[in-house]
Image (cartoon, rainbow, N blue to C red):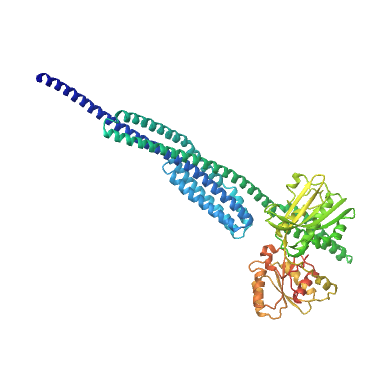
């Protein structure tokens, strides 16, 4: 029996060995297969992560390109507001946003450094950024130093520069290139994820079949499950990140659209400011009016000369005609300066109700008896800090416009009330308390197309010869210079109300000074007898005319063409009674000369002469001084000089 068992046992052992060998081979193959599956899963996960990283890089590149565009847009908008308002905080915003754009361009270069085309575009963007930055920096520097005309000109040139559109095109090209590869990278990520999922499923199946074959297989299976779980978690995190980034992109797009709208509004305001402040546009209208007035002056003087040569003495009316033409030219000059907001005001605490009430008779005589003037003063109306003469001129201009709109018949209503305005509720007015002076008529009203141009210089709907078109422009300049605004409510066929909004002021109304009129009544023939006047004027003709006028008034003169020569002469002369100096002169200005004279010779009276104070600096420099405006009459010259010699104080402008 034993002999029979051994062969069976050997056969069984052989089969067992065979099966064991087969199992070992199977186990080896399964191990190799399992190892191969694990390797493929790991490689697939790596491919998926790489694809996801490339997709994320494309998203970041697109977002960063948009951020650069937005930072440049904010910088341009801040610079535009800075040029208009001279608000230094806006200049800081401009520089901060511009530097932010530069840092973002550097980040963009790092992101796309592995892409030849994108890297070249990024370098091109940096070059354009630096070129555009140089142009905008010049504009900002002029605005920061108060040279707003040059800043406006440079800003216009920068707006026409090729750098701005070139930057936008480069940014768009970078974003478009990234969007082009983004689709392919997203497809790669999806394919890698699906491949990873498929391999993970195969690994699970192999693990279920071979899990009991060996501890090694089991350990590998457990690790595969863990890897698959981590892969799913990373995929979900990536999907969440993509969703969040998509939402962020949508938000950024909405902000960009809002900023584009705001930028369009700012550009429109800038264009309007250019129209209102570009005095060069006024050349044609100014030449027309001045030629008319100069024709009167030249004609009157020519007629007077001819009569004098003929031995006739009836020349007074021709001289009066020439003087009237000169006065009208001077008045137009003041109106132009007020329109350009360059003529300095002499503000004082003013009772608006009293001023309007006292103008009622004047307005009635001016516009005629066929129009009823109704004054409606409010209760407890605040004081205002304005130049009362300019305010009277503004109200008178509005009344004349209302008369013309009503064609000489109707009711003209003038009211003064307290109002409270929110920021930009009326034009560019800041929030606060204001006094509203409204002039209302029952005329034909204004159509919308007329309203668009109503504040433009020399724009008028009146027939030729009936108006210069400077009325509302002058009022606009006066209101802005006084810290206020102008509002217009109109309805075609019903009428128009023009409202001046002037800031309320705490204080008592200033007392009127009538000393000049009472002095002129008994003016002596030679009021400057035994007086020596130092005349400093760079224009030879004006200097000679002033010398002759002083001599005619009995005085002596010591004339000089510049401030340096006058200072040197004062070191040698102790008998000078008064310094009469022009304000705007080459080299040392009249204000600078006066500052030095007041320090060295504090007892010497000073009278300023000027045709345009705006060129010499802020009108506050002449506050409390006696100022004589060109052109001036003999009476105005006497008034200014004797007031200074007699020690009268105040900021009374002699040339009204």
The residue under the point 50% across, 43% down is 63
- Position above or below: 386 against 218: below
> 402 or 433: which is nearer to us?
433
The residue under the point 81% across, 49% down is 464
Location of residue 9 in the rendering, given as x and y in whole percent from the top left corner = 14, 22
Image quarter hosting the C terminus: bottom right
Task: Specify the farthest residue to the front.
Answer: 1
Going by the image, does 55 lie left or right of 641? left
Location of residue 577 in the rendering, given as x and y in whole percent from the top left corner = 73, 78
Question: In which quadrant of the rendered view does residue 422 lie?
Answer: bottom right
Image quarter hosting the N terminus: top left
> 468 or 212: which is nearer to us?
212
The reply to whether residue 417 is visible in this rendering is yes
The reply to whether residue 329 is visible in this rendering is no
- Position above or below: 315 against 444: below
Question: In which quadrant of the rendered view does residue 6 lie?
Answer: top left
Task: Specify the farthest residue to the bottom.
Answer: 574
Location of residue 638 in the rendering, given as x and y in whole percent from the top left corner = 79, 72
Question: In which quadrant of the rendered view does residue 347 lie?
Answer: bottom right
Total marks placed = 0
Going by the image, does 89 lie left or right of 346? left
Location of residue 138 in the rendering, given as x and y in whole percent from the top left corner = 56, 55
The residue under the point 55% across, 52% down is 135
């Amino acid at each position: 029996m034993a002999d029979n068992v051994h062969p069976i046992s050997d056969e069984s052992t052989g089969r067992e060995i065979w099966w064991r060998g087969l199992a070992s081979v199977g186990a080896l193959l399964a191990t190799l297969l399992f190892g191969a599956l694990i390797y493929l899963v790991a490689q697939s996960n790596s491919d998926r992560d790489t694809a996801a990283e490339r997709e994320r890089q494309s998203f970041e590149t697109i977002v960063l390109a948009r951020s650069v565009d937005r930072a440049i847009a904010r910088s341009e908008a801040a610079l535009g507001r800075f040029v208009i308002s001279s608000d230094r905080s806006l200049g800081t915003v401009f520089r901060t946003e511009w530097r932010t754009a530069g840092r973002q361009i550097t980040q963009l270069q790092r992101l796309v450094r592995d892409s030849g085309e994108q890297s070249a575009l990024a370098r091109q963007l940096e070059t354009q950024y630096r070129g555009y930055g140089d142009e905008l920096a010049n504009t900002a520097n002029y605005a920061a130093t108060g040279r707003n005309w040059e800043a406006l000109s440079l800003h216009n040139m920068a707006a026409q520069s090729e750098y701005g559109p070139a930057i936008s095109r480069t940014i768009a090209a970078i974003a478009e290139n990234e969007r082009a590869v983004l689709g392919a990278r997203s497809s790669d990520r999806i394919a890698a994820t699906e491949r990873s999922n498929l391999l993970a499923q195969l690994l699970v199946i192999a693990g279920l079949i071979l899990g009991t074959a060996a501890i090694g297989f089991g350990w590998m299976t457990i690790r595969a499950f863990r890897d698959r779980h981590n892969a799913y978690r990373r995929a979900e995190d990536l999907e969440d990140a993509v969703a969040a980034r998509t939402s962020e992109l949508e938000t950024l797009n909405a902000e960009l659209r809002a900023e584009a709208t705001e930028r369009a509004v700012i550009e429109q305001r800038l264009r309007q400011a250019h129209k209102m402040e570009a005095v060069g546009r006024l050349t044609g209208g100014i030449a027309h009016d001045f030629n008319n007035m100069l024709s009167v002056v030249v004609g009157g003087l020519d007629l007077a000369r001819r009569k004098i040569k003929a031995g006739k003495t009836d020349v007074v009316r021709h001289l009066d005609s020439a003087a009237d033409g000169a006065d009208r030219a001077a008045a137009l000059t003041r109106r132009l300066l007020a329109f350009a907001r360059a003529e300095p005001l002499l503000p004082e605490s003013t009772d608006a109700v009293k001023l309007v009430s006292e103008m009622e008779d004047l307005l009635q005589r001016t516009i005629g008896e066929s129009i009823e003037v109704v004054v409606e003063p409010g209760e407890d109306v605040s004081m205002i800090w304005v130049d009362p003469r300019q305010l009277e001129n503004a109200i008178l201009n509005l009344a004349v416009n209302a008369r013309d709109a009503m064609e000489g018949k109707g009711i003209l209503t003038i009211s003064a009330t307290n109002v409270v305005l929110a920021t930009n509720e009326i034009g560019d007015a800041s929030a606060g308390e204001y006094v509203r002076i409204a002039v209302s008529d029952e005329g034909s009203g204004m159509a919308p197309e007329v309203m668009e141009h109503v504040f433009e210089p020399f724009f008028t709907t009146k027939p030729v010869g009936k108006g210069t078109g400077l009325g509302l422009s002058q009022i606009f300049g006066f209101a802005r210079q006084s810290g206020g605004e102008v509002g217009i409510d109109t309805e075609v066929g019903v009428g128009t109300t023009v409202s001046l909004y002037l800031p309320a002021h705490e204080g008592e109304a200033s007392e009127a000074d009538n000393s000049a009129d009472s002095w002129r009544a008994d003016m002596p023939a030679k009021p400057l007898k035994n007086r020596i006047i130092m005349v400093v004027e760079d224009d030879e003709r004006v200097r000679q005319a002033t010398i002759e006028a002083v001599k005619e008034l009995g005085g002596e003169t010591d004339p000089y063409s510049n401030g340096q020569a006058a200072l040197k002469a004062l070191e040698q002369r102790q008998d000078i009674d008064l310094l009469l100096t022009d304000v705007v002169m080459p080299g040392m200005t009249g204000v600078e000369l006066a500052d030095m004279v007041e320090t060295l010779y504090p007892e010497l009276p000073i009278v300023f002469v000027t045709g345009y104070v705006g060129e010499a600096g802020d009108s506050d420099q002449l506050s409390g001084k006696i100022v004589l405006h060109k052109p001036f009459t003999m009476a105005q010259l006497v008034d200014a000089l004797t007031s200074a010699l007699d020690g009268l104080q105040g900021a009374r402008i002699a040339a009204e």
